[in-house]
Amino acid sequence: MTDAQEKPRPRRRAKPARSAVAPDAAARPDRRAAILLSAEALFAERGYAAVSVRDIATRAGVPIALVGYYFGRKPELFGTIFEHRQIYIRERIARIEAVDCNPANAGAVEQLVRAWAEPVISMRGSEAGDVFALLVARTAWDPGPEAIEIIKRFYDPLARAFFGAMQQAIPTCAPDRIVWAYEYAVGALLMYVGDKRIERLTEGRAASADPEQCEDFIRFVTAGFEALR
Amino acid sequence: MTDAQEKPRPRRRAKPARSAVAPDAAARPDRRAAILLSAEALFAERGYAAVSVRDIATRAGVPIALVGYYFGRKPELFGTIFEHRQIYIRERIARIEAVDCNPANAGAVEQLVRAWAEPVISMRGSEAGDVFALLVARTAWDPGPEAIEIIKRFYDPLARAFFGAMQQAIPTCAPDRIVWAYEYAVGALLMYVGDKRIERLTEGRAASADPEQCEDFIRFVTAGFEALR
DNA sequence: AGGCTGTTTGTACAGTCGTACATAATCTTG
DNA sequence: CAAGATTATGTACGACTGTACAAACAGCCT
């Protein structure tokens, strides 16, 4: 347990290249997609380690061994989920890079916050969006090595794009202070999309999809960054 | 697995009343405290579910069965840790209640944020403080039922004290908006004390104990609340 | 000395876990 | 139809889990 020495496991069968599915693609249910969706929902609810491969298979309505057949080992399945949702991340980076960060642009800070947060906020409400947003929040706070690897691979680029741009917008501010502020903003956003306590604290009146609430969030974070000036 | 029906387990031996330990209290090592410290550190590092009772016993240098003897079942051990640190929470509530929340007091918002955050920030640096702060952050994001129960029991009172006071300080603001903003602030604070990514993103230059950084945090959150006006 | 009380242990039970593997069913192509 | 590729499945292995329990140990009082 102390030292997880190298596992010289023989690699699994190579993942099939998902060949062009024949005309009856609709007739036969896509079990691969079912597993992926099931895994995503369960990981989002309970966190990576608390979900067993058996749980995933049961929820998807397939035999256990099929999970391994399609996705290999558990960490690879985890990674595949994020690869499927990579569009969401790329959209945020693109929006950040589209902002005019010239210090002369007085609204640059707010525009950056919007570019960074709005894609996340607006994907809430839809089934898939809610689930994935929650999954990201869980994963960001998951101390397990598999989760850390995921954040590094998929979300560090977004982080660097953001505070690279913010640094241009507030050139007088020391870079590390911006990184810290970015962390606070991430913390706030994760709460916005992933916290379950709000329902309890507002006695059931919570409405995270409320556009009013979204504007308040933007205001909160923008004001925080502006305070660094 | 689907339904965790009632476990009519016969209760363990009653917890001994920690009788006045004989003169050799120093001679014999306090294994009870060793277990508690070991458990706290491990739960903080890996999260509740990822730590086994065997891990705790091994780190404390005691046989496995001793954990059960002193603390009963695993969830009870978890709760006992927080009972031991309750002083930290009570101090924050006391400081919040000491703030003059009259709307005429222009600095009330900042004073409330300080009262709420400074006890946490200033306990960092010390060994025990760092560990407990990290434990709280992990627990706040732990989706498991044991963790949710802990937050409800120990941290909901603090939350209600805070946004009760903040409501007095900003009476024109709708109560639920304050609750949301409180969530964002909690998210930011948890990042401040519990996130491990900062070291990677600043390329090793991170210094969370830096008093300069602490002031920036207060500024960030205060500005966020002020933006609700 | 004995008895009593609180501590300390080794061990065992009944589960669950991830993963591999041999085999079977089904589809695609010749 | 037959051959080959792909998809599907039941089962088993070793490792690890939380927790109970009987037995042994220590120190103190009478």
Image: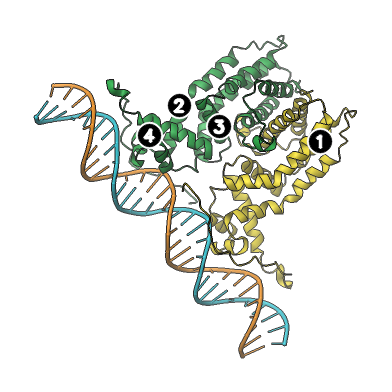
Chain colours: A green, B yellow, C orange, D cyan
**What is the chain identity of the residue bearing mark 4?**
A
Q: Secondary structure at mark 2?
A: helix
Q: Which residue is mark 4?
A: A71
Q: In which quarter of the view is residue A74 placed?
A: top left
**What is the chain identity of the residue bearing mark 2?**
A
Of the numbered discs 3 and 2, the one sitting upstream in the chain is 2
Tell me the mark number nearer the camera, choosing from 3 and 2.
3
Same-chain status of marks 3 and 4: yes
| Cα–Cα gap, marks 1 and 2 | 45 Å
Same-chain status of marks 1 and 4: no
| Cα–Cα gap, marks 1 and 4 | 51 Å
Of the numbered discs 3 and 4, the one sitting upstream in the chain is 4
Given the image, on which type of amino acid does mark 3 rest?
Answer: Leu
Q: Secondary structure at mark 1?
A: helix
Q: Which residue is mark 3?
A: A134
State the residue at coordinates (53%, 32%).
A135
4 and 2 marks in contact (CB < 8 Å): no
Q: Which residue is mark 1?
A: B165
Q: Secondary structure at mark 3?
A: helix
